[in-house]
Image (cartoon, rainbow, N blue to C red):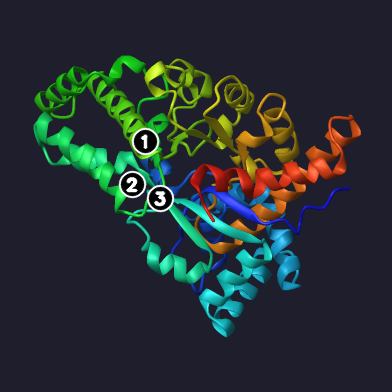
Amino acid sequence: MLDFSDLSVVDAHCHPYRRADNLSADEWVNAVSFGGGSPEYLQAGGIEVDAAAQAMLQRVKRDTLYFRYMLRRMAEFFQVEATVDAVVAARNRAIKDNGYGVYAQGLHQAGKIETLIVDDGHPLPQVDLRRFRAQVGVEVLPVFRIEALIQQLLDEDSAWPEFQRAYDEGIAMALSDGGYVGLKSIIAYRTGLDIDPRSRSADQGMVALEKIRRARGRSGDAIKNLRDHLFCRAIELCIDFDAPFQVHTGMGDWEVHLDACRPALLMELLRYPAYRACKFLLVHTGYPYHAEAGYIANALPNIWCDLSEGLPFAGNAGARIIAEVLEMAPLSRVCYGSDTYGSPEPFYTSALLGKQALAQAMQQLINDGFMSEAQAREAAKMILSDNARELYDAS
């Protein structure tokens, strides 16, 4: 079996986290796991979040295959029993004895994680990136989420000329002097990925905003028209600044429009002549529609895919996801990513799982006569770090 454990990692999509020295078992589970909804989700449906509901949420989170994998890997790291209580106690003790920074840096180093490309639009309020860099001890490159700026401008009640100018200036400042290395959009969570490339017309933005202002929140299609226009304008600004544009595709939390997040919906937009110079990263590779993203990365030359969320949250499906993406995607257009957040532990265990899944997928390609062992190792190095470094011009 191939072993890529010694290879370094650039995480092409993840989120910064806040320091939390002493967590209870339930708090730690909430910080590191995926799925199972939230108290807010239940409350919005009129369900009382009592002790039984809290226990149900915890059980769902703890019963995913990825959580169980992470628990086993962390138990091995600490040399303790593979139970939540034992791992959390060992975690809290390590932080108390050595300090949070030493603990976090030790996990990133153990996973050979060298660079984190972070979307600081989550969590809110935003994490102080200077403090975060000092804690994790690795290179941190942020991308600017455009939806935060859009919401800010909608709240300010400005007219179109001022709105348009502030939007352009906000993005330009982020990419020039703000330290951001690219943009990010979660329009799939808002109005979906079916974006007409002709939305770039300034008239569409102006008319849509006027309708929104007059309707006072009851704007119907106007909010989609405005968001589509601003998305197209963000593409143009990325081209101007030669910056990559991350676009959320595929799975997310319970709020995502799952039927409107397929990568295929972006095809007309991505191949529009005016946008062909933009470098797009299809975040999450559209999982569970990842084969679509792999095909698009083959058909269009400026498209990259990152493997986040499928890795690590789909657990033992990692090797299958990688194999299906690589059915069409060029090796030079696939990046490792995790979408991890909350605490340093899932960054470490996601890197372990990513390398394990990649080794399994590459071993099958060797067995089937598609590459040699040396070529498989070079491909793994590209996916784990080199492709993202090239895309983001990272050291």
- Find the distance from the CA under tag 2 to the CA under tag 1: 8 Å
* Closer mark to the observer between disc 3 and disc 1: 1
Q: Is residue 126 left or right of residue 314?
A: left
**Image quadrant assignment for residue 328:** top right
Task: Specify the amino acid type for callout 2.
Answer: Leu
- Please tell me which of labels 2 and 1 falls first in the chain: 2
Contact between labelled residues 2 and 3, with CB atoms less than 8 Å apart:
no
Contact between labelled residues 1 and 2, with CB atoms less than 8 Å apart:
yes
Q: Is residue 388 left or right of residue 174?
A: right
Contact between labelled residues 1 and 3, with CB atoms less than 8 Å apart:
no
- Find the distance from the CA under tag 3 to the CA under tag 2: 19 Å
Camera-side residue: 160 or 58?
Answer: 160
- Please tell me which of labels 3 and 1 falls first in the chain: 3
Q: Label 3: few (<14), some or many (≥20) within 10 Å?
A: some
Q: Residue 210, position in %: x, y?
A: 12, 23
* Mark 2 residue element: helix
Residue designated by label 2? 175
The residue sitting at 64% across, 43% down in the picture is: 311
Q: Residue 50, position in %: x, y?
A: 45, 53
The residue sitting at 45% across, 54% down in the picture is: 141
Residue 335 is at least partly visible in this image? yes
Camera-side residue: 362 or 285?
Answer: 362
The residue sitting at 53% across, 62% down in the picture is: 343
Residue designated by label 3? 122
Q: Residue 8, position in %: x, y?
A: 67, 57
* Mark 3 residue element: loop
- Find the distance from the CA under tag 3 to the CA under tag 1: 21 Å
Q: Is residue 293 left or right of residue 161?
A: right
Q: In the figure, 63 relative to 290: above or below?
A: below
Camera-side residue: 60 or 144?
Answer: 144
Residue designated by label 1? 238
